[in-house]
Image: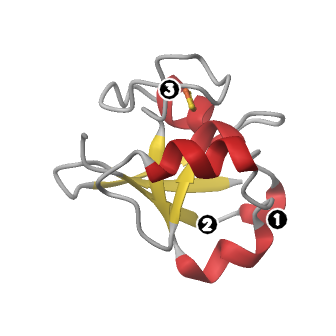
Amino acid sequence: PKLIVVNRAGEESTVEVGDGLTVMEAIRDNGFDELLALCGGCCSCATCHIHVDPEFKDKLPAISEDEDDLLESSDHRNENSRLSCQVPFSAELDGLKVTIAPED
Ligand code: FES
């Protein structure tokens, strides 16, 4: 399945994602170093913040309390905000487009 990533410069790239990865891992493994993901996916740093295509929002797992708290600390939260380490990628999400949120 494919994931479309828009970087902070607004450039769009399509990456092929293997099984069992989170969206954070898929982005990081494809060399987008502006997604820091400092905590490595433990839901404690909020540096993996993305904005997701609203069309896919219903297919994503619900936001946990921890994720919600962390997103609240960002100046760039909007209704499409997620922490990408909390979103497992799957064939169901083929074609999902995510935008790396501006740095806080
Ligand atoms: Fe730290 Fe997602 S990588 S919260």
Q: Position of residue 17 (x, y in %)?
A: 67, 41
The answer to whether the residue bearing label 3 lies less than 8 angstroms from the nearest atom of ligand 1 is yes
The image quadrant where one finds the C terminus is top left
Residue 41 position within the rendered picture, expressed as x and y whole percent measured from the top left: 64, 24
According to the image, label 3 marks what residue?
45
- Give the amino acid at mark 3: Cys
| 94 on left or right of 95 | right
Q: Quadrant of residue 12?
A: bottom left
- Assign ligand 1 to one image quadrant: top right
Kind of residue indicated by mark 1: Glu
Secondary structure beneath disc 1? Answer: helix
Under circle 2, the secondary element is loop
The residue that mark 1 highlights is 92
Up-down: is 4 above or below 56?
above
Q: Which residue is mark 2?
A: 95
Circles 3 and 2, Cβ within 8 Å, touching? The answer is no
